Image (cartoon, coloured by chain):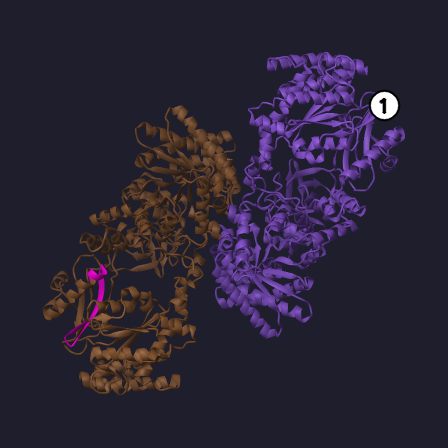
Chain colours: A purple, B brown
């Protein structure tokens, strides 16, 4: 005989938390509490195997299920000293809930008070002496049951209540009397009769099986199927059904209900924390009509409450609750979020689960529990969610502040910032020089805006996605950014932002919250992050655990220092072109571009060389002893050309050309698809003098810093390689410049030459490229664009729709597409290692800071990830999680 | 003892044409002729193994080589009854030539008259009684030897001759006397002494080994290495050295020299054809100072020559030559290109090789030889080069016409055309309606120009590459096109083209040659192609042999009929968007795009439906019984939007919007990288009503044509699929519309639903997509763009440089990149077939008409290729070549 039904209650249970697959999460948890001797209302769980049986057998139940349910119900009746369906004497009412392995939206949730009918409700009146309570319970049951089991009345019942209230001139449910509910119950039943053609079921057994059937039925409803598909939950897992005795906290002043946390979920402080209400039901605590009371005296003092604490009013029950709290936290080794009900002086625990907490609390609880010896270091590391960690690294809006929202965009770069609105990078720089704090507000940003972006407190754009220029650069700089706030309209000419019918002018103060995308009016108070000792301790443990190294994407000294402070182990991507936009330099870059002869081009490059060399000297000095990967020029040349007539004139003047010449050059360089254009190593092949200048600057800087006694580990990276000969040709050039520099300076130094793998073709021929390349760095931004055929600048509008429709689970620019892009990374890693077993493999796309992507990189055996400086701690933690085998998100079905 | 040296001559030889690897092409051929009993001047070949030995042993020779050379030279002396280095009595002079397996530019070519020195030259005077001849031969030898063996004098000797002629007041070489040459020889020798520090070698043995060493040395020179790399020739193949007795056609009136073809190389007619000169050397025939005489009387009549034919003057030698011609053609089973010399009444054959021929000749020779029983059908098919076949399908410029070139562009679509210049599509249509022939002349074309392109005789653009819009569309229509003629400057405002200092106005007549890219002034006479009976015969044999099916890319009735006439087996790609550009329709397309509600969009689509349905009815009727693959809308919507203010106004008016609305929509739809933008199935997902309309039009047409009793085999193709759910979602829609149409019309029909594989991601997850897709069509244009990260619209300038620098061997948009794109095709084919063994696989990119690419498609087992109508015969022939295992071009090293 197969066992289909598992009982719990009275200090014991069939099964426990290890039986999640069989009992579902909720059932396993209830059994576990019962086993611990914690008083939980008795009940039983119909296992997930019944669900599987149900669907494998044309939606029928095993023949022996009914007997087992009957027996289990008898057990519950015995423990609870009450009878299911009793018309006289103690009455057992039950709740029926679904319970899959993981909680799942779309599944039937809960039916309460099951067992009530026209007769038992009268027994309940007798037993409680509270007619209003009994009939209110009954009508709630009819309402819930009709909705979730019979699929009728949801909307109609609301209308019936509204009409009724109107008729009797009442507003709130609390105003309703027993007679009011009685009258409504008759209307409900009539509605059910009308809709279903049948009477509302009066037989408690029929009610019970109706509810059980509804749970199993909901496993295959559309929302549940979609959810499972998106979350890779197999259909055959099935759901369990939990049937449990009801207890009531509203049976008089010796009854109560409450919620509590074993530690403070906001701060993490090891202090018992919660609230309760006398003579109330769970939903009353939530509804907020009555003010809940504190549990402990300490808490009462802390929050300055003048209501009596449970410790004062119900001291023995309070101490019993504290003992349960201790037992549960010790048992689960984690902060618990618990619900309890006191029914006529008896304390019942209804639920315990690991409590949600803020990032700060998560950190403190993990570290303290480790120090208390409750958990080990690995477990402490597991307890902090890398995605959440980001909150700790940036200022946050004070949760208690009042907010005046203007609109919402994408949370493009975390942290909150306030400042005066300016509409151009030039204004941002001018105002900042004058000591003002500004928010740079643009429709979108371009590389020319870099100066203004650097001095702004925050950046707001009305167009563009999570990987727009503004977003990428802002994250790199750690500057808060809200991108693509489409409801706001910017008028550059009038220098205004329009939000609905409000118009803000240049100089008005706004606050942006880059952690959630909010744009708020005025200055809003913020909380500054404190990287306390706990942070340092945890990150120390993280570093002991992880296998992946973590580098930073950085090119400015500020970024590099920030990254090193955040514990990076080198630079994985220094984008040399970012060094070209400085106003002193851009003119020479433009001269170089409009040059018509090699000599002119060389002359312009010669002027750039000292700037680049000084940049590299600074970087190498900051990163002394750590590897620094420098990518040679990547973007197409037209990205550096000006847009205004004044700028055209300036370039023409500097280069000794006419404005028409310069404009003709700009038009000649224009590209239909610049992403797929004349860029990367294609520039290095067709204008070798550009890469030569860059290499000369790099190696001169290496020689300089090395001669000062520092260790320099330069890695020269060739971008956008598609065919082997591109790489071979350019490596030869790099080697030649290195040899020449060693000879000229007399310095001896080591260096590596490698390539980005950012085109599908490069991934496919990685074995051949590895013959010359000493390292690969996966440029997953471009690799995603080419593998998907998807421009990150343009994909915003339809990617959002794609996610809404469930066509794709996530934005592939935010979290690595493991099925497609990941497959190419695997191919490239395998092929590259086949040729060169010690090849160094890393990733330097935006994905390097995304925990799920970091996990994937760990799994395919990369040596390092590289991400923006502010994401370094997140990547370190994610790498540790990966090494511990937690937190993997798969995008494949 | 290893045999290093192989002799030939006197009707026998060591080795023959099967020994190409050992003897090189030239050596094997000479041996073969000798074996056939054809009189060739005796000689010997130093095998390629010596070359390999030479490089494996620090550039030294095998110890026993010298003995073998000496023995072989003794053999030659015996056969030729002359002595190498003889100062008295018969003198043997030799030529030394390189000879690799395949002829290879960059290798040392030839040293003639080797063995002459200050003493032997006097013997030569005695022997020939011709002092001028002897000294001229000596100075030629010094000049050649110094250049190719000693590496000196090339330029200096020319200067010496010029100065000398100036001094003695002579202009031509023929004016120079024996004394003049003697004087110059002294100057040459002095120059050699000055440059090399050594005397010019007088010892014939030293000369011989110097020349042999130069041949082996040239195997590793830079040009040869580069050539081998580009043509995938391994270094270890090595070259052979051929040493052969000299014979002279300029030893009096009983000496002569000539060249001949066994059949007419222009027409293919089976008529012996050639020319000769009495008392002359080979180079005199080429130099054109004397008019060569015809060989046969028939030829003399045919060309209307009044010079005596060899058949008249030297009848017995003529008949001997004819007998050699017969023997060689029969032996080689192919038309031969031969060289001969008559020295003092003795006929020597110096060379025979398969002759180059025009496409028309190739076709005729192949068919006639097959009918003569010389070769079989398979061999006949092999003899016609698919690439050459293209010439036969289009008008050609008469080779005899005088030409006045204006400039040159890319040969974008073959054929020649003349017409009056017009500068806009509208003008083209207006002028054509007025009965004029026009050449549409644009900087570049866009989809809006399609009407004008259709009526033009030819298309000329000054920007864009082989896969620019103009080029692709022109090839599809079979209209001649020259693209990217960058030297020409178009001024739309003035309506002129400037070519150098010439200015052509609207209405001036030009001729373009799309087969070679030439732009010519005025009307130039053309030859019309005749698809003679030979063409039909050969194509019949082709179809018996090939395995791959050949379809056409076509959407207009004209294209479809053309393709069917050219023997296509269905349509592999009908680009529905091309049907949208008709002036009657484009307005509705634009209405649809600017619609702000679903209802407006549906209303506009409703107006388009009848047009699309009628298009499909026509296509299905023309293609009755053959499959027709219809691709749903692919380009981004903004491609359909207007550019002029008038057009904006018209759209606004038709759609009931303001011009500002329409412009705002255009700006909203603008994309930074449209190639990677909101297009293909992304449109189908986000605007399902568009694809629904198209499917409705398709299936209504299917029902219509089917009810008329025709067989219709529609295949609906979803473009740009990247993730499985895109395909699944849209297949469901297609199926629903099909079912609905069957129900409404009462027709029952079959159809298939499949997808383009045009993104790397789709190739990688082909196994998953194949769960729903019944066919794949490789869209190799886009697959090349994404795999390479290369925009075909932008790549022109640097791809040309890449090819020049040898970074890539060919334009990957013209010939499939087998290493990268081909790898993805292999992956997708394997994975697709794993899931669905009978999945139909095809290719519909531009590569479908490229012979090397067709070969690759055959090798990976595709079912069909699809190409533009005019390339259908080429693809058929290429497919037959592939089935016969010839003509494979590999792009991998």
Quarter-of-image position of residue B709: top left
Q: Residues within 10 Å of mark 1 (few under 14, many from 20)?
A: some
Q: Position of residue B731 (x, y in %)?
A: 46, 34
Query: Which one is nearer the viewer's eye here, B232 or B513?
Result: B232
Q: Can you see residue B427?
A: no
Q: Is residue B199 left or right of residue B314?
A: right
Indicate the position of residue B146 as horizontal and vertical percent values: 34, 80
**Percent x, y for residue A336?**
77, 37
Q: Point out the stretch of residues depicted in magenta.
A: B329-349
Q: Quadrant of residue A172?
A: top right
The verdict on residue B344 being magenta is yes
Residue B373 seen in this snapshot: yes
Give the position of the C terminus of chain A as an image quadrant: top right
Judge left or right: residue B260 versus residue B110.
Answer: left
The answer to which of A349 and B811 lies nearer the viewer is A349
Q: Quadrant of residue A231?
A: top right
Residue at which label 1 appears = A254
Residue A588 is inside the magenta segment: no
Along the line of sight, the residue nearer the viewer: B103 or A178: B103
């Amino acid at each position: 005989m197969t066992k289909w039904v598992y009982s719990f209650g009275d200090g014991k249970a069939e099964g426990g938390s290890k039986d999640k697959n069989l009992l579902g999460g909720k059932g396993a948890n209830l059994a576990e509490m019962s086993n611990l001797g914690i008083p939980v209302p008795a009940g039983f769980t119909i296992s997930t195997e019944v669900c599987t049986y149900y669907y494998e057998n044309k939606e029928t139940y095993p023949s022996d299920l009914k007997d087992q349910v009957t027996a289990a119900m008898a057990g519950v009746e015995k423990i609870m000293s009450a009878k299911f369906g009793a018309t006289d004497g103690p009455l057992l009412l039950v709740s029926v809930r679904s319970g899959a392995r993981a909680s799942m939206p779309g599944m039937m949730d809960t039916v309460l008070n099951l067992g009530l009918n026209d007769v038992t409700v009268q027994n309940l009146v007798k037993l409680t002496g509270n007619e209003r309570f009994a009939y209110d319970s009954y009508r709630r049951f009819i309402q819930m049951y009709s909705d979730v089991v019979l699929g009728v009345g949801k909307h109609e019942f609301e209308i019936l209540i509204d009409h009724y209230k109107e008729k009797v001139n009442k507003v709130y449910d609390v105003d309703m009397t027993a007679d009011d509910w009685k009258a409504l119950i008759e209307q409900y039943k009539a509605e059910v009769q009308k809709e279903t053609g049948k009477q509302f079921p009066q037989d408690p057994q029929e009610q019970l099986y109706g509810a059980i059937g509804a749970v199993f039925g909901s496993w295959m409803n559309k929302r549940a199927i979609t959810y499972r598909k998106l979350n890779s939950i197999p259909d055959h897992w099935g759901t369990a059904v939990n049937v449990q005795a009801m207890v009531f906290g509203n049976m008089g002043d010796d009854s109560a209900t409450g919620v509590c946390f074993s530690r403070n979920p906001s701060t993490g402080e090891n202090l018992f924390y919660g609230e309760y209400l006398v003579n109330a039901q769970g939903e009353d605590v939530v509804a907020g009509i009555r003010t809940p009371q504190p549990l402990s005296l300490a808490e009462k003092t802390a929050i300055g409450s003048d209501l009596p604490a449970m410790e004062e009013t119900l001291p023995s029950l309070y101490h019993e609750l504290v003992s349960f709290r201790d037992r549960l936290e010790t048992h689960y080794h984690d902060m618990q979020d618990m619900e309890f009900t006191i029914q006529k002086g008896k304390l019942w625990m209804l639920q315990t689960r690991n409590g949600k907490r803020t990032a700060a609390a998560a950190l403190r609880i993990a570290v303290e529990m480790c120090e208390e010896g409750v958990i080990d270091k690995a477990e402490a590391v597991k307890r902090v969610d890398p995605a959440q960690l980001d909150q700790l690294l940036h200022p946050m809006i004070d949760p208690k502040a009042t907010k005046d929202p203007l609109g919402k965009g994408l949370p493009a770069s975390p942290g909150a910032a306030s400042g005066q609105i300016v509409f151009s990078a030039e204004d941002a720089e001018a105002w900042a020089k004058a000591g003002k704090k500004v928010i740079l507000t643009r429709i979108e940003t371009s590389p020319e805006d870099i100066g203004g972006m650097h001095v702004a407190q925050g950046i707001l754009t009305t167009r563009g996605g999570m990987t727009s220029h503004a977003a990428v650069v802002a994250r790199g700089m750690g500057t808060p950014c809200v991108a693509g706030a489409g409801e706001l309209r910017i008028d550059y000419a009038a220098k205004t932002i329009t939000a609905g019918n409000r118009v803000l002018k240049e100089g008005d103060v706004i606050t942006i919250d880059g952690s959630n995308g909010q744009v708020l009016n005025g200055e809003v108070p913020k909380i500054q992050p404190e990287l306390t000792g706990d942070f340092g301790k945890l990150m120390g443990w993280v570093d002991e655990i992880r296998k992946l190294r973590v580098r930073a994407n950085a090119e400015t000294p500020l970024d590099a220092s920030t990254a090193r402070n955040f514990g990076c182990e080198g630079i994985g991507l220094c984008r040399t072109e970012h060094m070209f936009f400085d106003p002193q330099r851009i003119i020479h870059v433009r001269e170089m571009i409009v040059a018509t002869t090699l000599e002119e081009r060389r002359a312009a490059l010669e002027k750039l060389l000292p700037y680049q060399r000084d940049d590299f000297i600074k970087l190498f000095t900051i990163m002394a002893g750590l590897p620094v990967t420098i990518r040679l020029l990547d973007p197409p040349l037209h990205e550096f050309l000006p847009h205004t007539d004044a700028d055209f004139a300036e370039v023409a003047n500097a280069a000794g050309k006419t404005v028409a010449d310069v404009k003709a050059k700009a038009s000649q360089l224009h590209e239909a698809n610049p992403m797929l254009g004349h860029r990367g190593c294609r520039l290095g092949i067709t204008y070798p003098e550009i890469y030569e200048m860059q290499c000369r600057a790099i190696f001169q800087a290496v020689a300089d810093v090395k001669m000062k006694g520092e260790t320099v580990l330069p890695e020269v990276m060739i971008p956008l390689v598609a065919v082997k000969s591109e790489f071979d040709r350019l490596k030869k050039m790099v080697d030649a410049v290195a040899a020449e520099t060693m000879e000229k300076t007399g310095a001896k130094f080591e260096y590596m030459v490698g390539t980005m793998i950012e085109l599908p073709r490069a991934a496919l021929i990685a074995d051949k490229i590895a013959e010359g390349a000493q390292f690969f760095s996966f440029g997953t931004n471009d690799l995603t664009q080419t593998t998907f055929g998807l421009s990150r600048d343009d994909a915003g509008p339809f990617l959002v729709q794609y996610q809404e429709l469930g066509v794709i689970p996530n934005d592939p620019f935010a979290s690595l597409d493991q099925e497609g892009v990941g497959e190419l990374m695997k191919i490239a890693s395998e092929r590259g290692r086949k040729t060169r077993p010690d090849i160094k493999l890393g990733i330097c796309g935006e994905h390097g800071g995304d925990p799920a992507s970091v996990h994937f990189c760990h799994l395919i055996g990369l040596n390092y990830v590289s991400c923006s400086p502010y994401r370094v701690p997140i990547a370190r933690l994610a790498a540790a999680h990966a090494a511990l085998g937690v937190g993997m998100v798969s995008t494949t079905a």
